[in-house]
Image: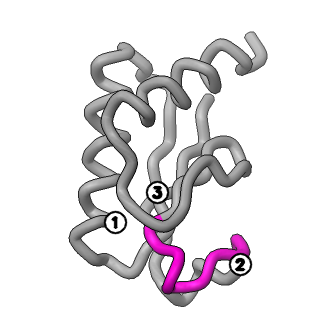
Amino acid sequence: MLDIKVLGTGCVGCLKMEQLVIEALQALGARDAKVELVTEERMIEYGLLGDRAPGLLINGKLAWAGSAPTKEQVTEWLQHALASAPV
């Protein structure tokens, strides 16, 4: 199962990233994934400050921070994570 966390303040960029992740997972047919929006007060637990939001963690690893990536980038990262996931 993929564990995905979108780290953000609830800003437009954070919500956009969350939507990109959901769309990419649907396009990949990945049904075994948990997507969580982690807000400001918990972002620091993951080493991300508000000025670097939004951030994207995939299985505990920071994949991106500072802006919303493209849908193609998100899809590529998720494909890699799915391929690397234990069976």
Question: For the residue marked with disc 1, what is the amino acid?
Answer: Cys
Task: Compare marks 2 and 3 and give the one earlier in the sequence.
Answer: 3
Counting from the top left corner in percent of width and height, residue 33 is at 50, 33
- How dense is the environment of label 3, judged by Cα within 10 Å: few (below 14), some, or many (20 and up)? few
* Placement of the N terminus among the 4 image quadrants: top right
Task: Choose top left, top right, bottom left or bottom right for residue 86.
Answer: top right
Q: Nearer the viewer, mark 3 or mark 1?
A: 1
* Placement of the C terminus among the 4 image quadrants: top right
Counting from the top left corner in percent of width and height, residue 46 is at 70, 71
The residue at the point 63 percent across, 26 percent down is: 81
Whether residues under marks 2 and 3 lie with C-beta atoms below 8 angstroms apart, the answer is no
Question: For the residue marked with disc 2, what is the amino acid?
Answer: Glu
Compared across the picture, whether 55 is left or right of 14 comes to: right
The residue at the point 59 percent across, 34 percent down is: 2
Counting from the top left corner in percent of width and height, residue 40 is at 49, 85
Task: Choose top left, top right, bottom left or bottom right for residue 42.
Answer: bottom right
Question: For the residue marked with disc 3, what is the amino acid?
Answer: Glu
Please name the residue that numbered disc 3 is placed on: 36
Whether residues under marks 3 and 1 lie with C-beta atoms below 8 angstroms apart, the answer is no
Please name the residue that numbered disc 2 is placed on: 45
* SS class, disc 3: strand
Real-space CA distance between mark 2 and mark 3, rounded to the nearest whole angstrom: 14 Å
Task: Compare marks 2 and 1 and give the one earlier in the sequence.
Answer: 1
Task: Compare marks 3 and 1 and give the one earlier in the sequence.
Answer: 1
Real-space CA distance between mark 3 and mark 1, rounded to the nearest whole angstrom: 11 Å
Real-space CA distance between mark 2 and mark 1, rounded to the nearest whole angstrom: 17 Å
Q: Please provide the residue range marked out in magenta.
A: 45-54
Residue 35 position (above or below residue 42): above
Please name the residue that numbered disc 1 is placed on: 14
